[in-house]
Image (spheres, helix red, strand yellow):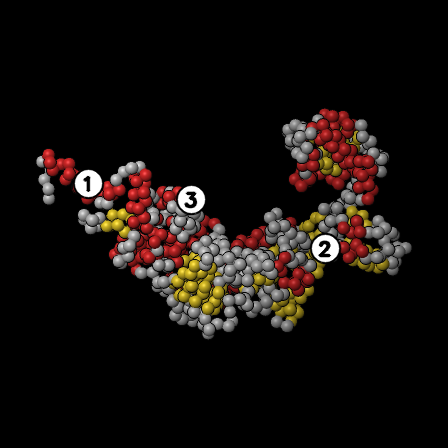
Amino acid sequence: MKQEGKVIAGGDPLAKIIDEKKLSLCVECGKCVASCPMAEFYDRFSFLFSARGIIKKALLGLDILKDSNIWFCLECDVCAQLCPAGVKYAEFVEDIRQLAISEGITKNSVVCPRCGRYYLPLPTVERLKEIMAEMGLAGEFIELCPQCRRDDMAEKLAFPTGLVKSG
Amino acid sequence: MAAPRIGVFICHCGTNIGGIVDVPQVVEYAKSLPYVAYAAANLYTCSEEGISSIKHAIKEYDLNRVVVASCTPRTHQPLFRNACADAGLNPYLFEFVNIREHCSWIHMQNRREATEKAKELVKMGVAKARWLDAQEEFESDVYPAAMVIGGGVAGMSAALNLANQGFEVHLVEKEPELGGRLLKLNRIFPINKDPSELVESIVKAVEGHSKIRLHMPAVVKAASGYIGNFDISVDEGGKEVSFKAGVIIVATGAQVLKPELYRYGELANVLTQLDLEQRLKDGKLGEFQNVVMINCVGARIPERPYCSRLCCMTAIKNAALMKEINSEAKVYVLYRDLMTYGVEFEEYYREVKEAGVRFIRYTPSNLPQVIGAERVESVRVYDELMDMELELPCDLLVLATPLIPNDDNEELSRILKVPIGDGGFFLEAHVKLRPVEFAMDGIYVGGSCRWPADIRESIAQGYAAASEAVIPLRQGLVKVEAITATVDPKICKGCGTCALVCPFDAIELKESEIRGLEGKIVSEVNTALCKGCGLCAAACPNGAVQQRGFTDMQLLSMVNALSGKR
């Protein structure tokens, strides 16, 4: 089915990120797609889901902040290591996620219940829970952000011994 | 004539031949052939040692024919002919047999049969050598002047080059002004400079050169003759001017297609790249916010299948310029394939992408659509990879159209008797080996009249054509290899078949002036024009036309030798 894309004027913060992460240098070689581990994780992996597709949509001025595909990347950075043009894709994804959250697009971002900060995309958390369930591990282990998880552990383990003081 | 005494030299060519063909066996076989007075093998016949062995044998054994069985005449025939000449033998009494490309290289898997084939090839060469005749090469003087047709950047470069080497040049330009296509351009890629800087300095040099005679506005009306001796007549502002030239360079350029696509000519804000350059040059472009450029408009389609080569870079250059004028503008380039060849152009492409110009690929099966009633308002383009129809806002649509041949190419081709190839551009003698020459000697070609060329290529080709053209001018004498056709007027019936098939217009029907044949209509070959292709000799119904070095007797004796007849 043919989709339709209305080209919108990209906002200034987005244009700045596109510029900083050198998206315009993309030569559409597809090395990022070939190297992306997401192809094994997700059945929905496609051109529009891939780094190359998202770069293209961003360059053409499509509304990628509202695009749910930007929330799947694990930021492993393999694509950027292989990119012959020097596009910093993982850094780009990180920045546009923050931009999306700052513009109130939060349905795919998971917030730490303890500190209230965004720490992982929803698809990643869901997938991790699935994997951990298969391994027989407790899913709630990842409900906190890494910092709070450490703090939580420290409190549980260290306070009884009196080694660390709270606050 | 003395009885033939043939010397046969079989070359090992290192292991190229010797590793496959049993050379000593072939030498022994050659000795058994009729009229062979001497046969020997060489490790490398083309070496100093090999050449002196030929010269020595000619004297020692009183040889009057020489056969070398080795590689290809393309590279080594002149060498062996010269060896004969040095030993006092007419060089046309030499015969070449190829037992490398035609034998050892293609029969590596079967040595025994390769040896048998080498023997047969040598037998045929010897059979032909028996009938060889001494020949004299035709020589003619070269008039030390050139005509260059076209006063664009290619033609001016060629004219300047020849004039600076001291030769008189007639430069014929049909417009009243020198400069050609360059006068209409706004900027030059990839340096983004005003072309007037370049063109003015060249025009000044041409106009101020004492050796260059300008004919302007003028067109060539007639040309006759051959290399070294062309008689030319031009119409110079209604006045007929005639002059002589030894060589001719064709550099007439091309024109830009005005398309009947994407509502060009109907909507005011649809331009070609050339229109855009003109408006930028005149400062009449006005405001713009959203620019869309479409490449390959009217090119690489069934009726015009070629790539015009310079439109990609033109689009990239003007897209960059649009961004330079208005950095807020959105600039999209819709392309089929981008050709940014070479390091410099690729770098330029990268810079333009960084400046914010966006590139979208379209396919010929799904062409972009122009939306708008009186002006273009948007362009819809289908992106195949995304499977998505994009609507790009647009207030200026620019179409990159190809260079197409000039309308008067056909007439010039008729006057100069030079060929036009597919698509209507002039056709060079060989795209790689003889790129700036016509098959017709003494006429050269360069720039966009041959194939779309950018400015640097046009200048380079202008210089290349001049470098080729200066060879006969400097030598002052042209020699024609003595393989041209001859007509026996006693046998010729004047049917004209030979004149009809000759691709070089070298044969004329004339009244004979020979005693006893006065008034008889016979064919006459102009040796200066004949290229020795042999068509006339093959076409002659009664054998009156013979090609020197390839006579019926010579060829039939080769066939007879092969079939075992003597």
Expressed as whole percent of the image width and height from the top left, the position of residue B196 reads 46, 63
Residue B357 sits above or below residue A128 on the image: below
User: Disc 2 marks which residue?
Assistant: B504
Q: Which mark is residue A150?
A: 1
Amino acid bearing label 1 = Arg
Q: Residue at x 20, y 50 (%)?
A: A116
Residue that protrudes farthest toward the right in the picture: B516
For label 2, the SS is loop
Quickly name the residue at label 3: A34
**Residue B74 to residue B215: above or below:** above
Callout 2 amino acid: Phe
Viewer-side label of 2, 1: 1
Instruction: State the quadrant of the N terminus of chain B.
Output: top right
Q: CA distance from mark 2 to mark 3?
A: 58 Å
Image location of residue A2, percent across then percent down? 45, 59
Q: Where on the picture, by quarter, is residue B42?
A: top right
Horizontal and vertical percent position of residue B432: 60, 48
Query: What subunit carries mark 1?
Result: A
Residue at 51% in and 57% down: B363
On the question of residue B516 being in view, the answer is yes
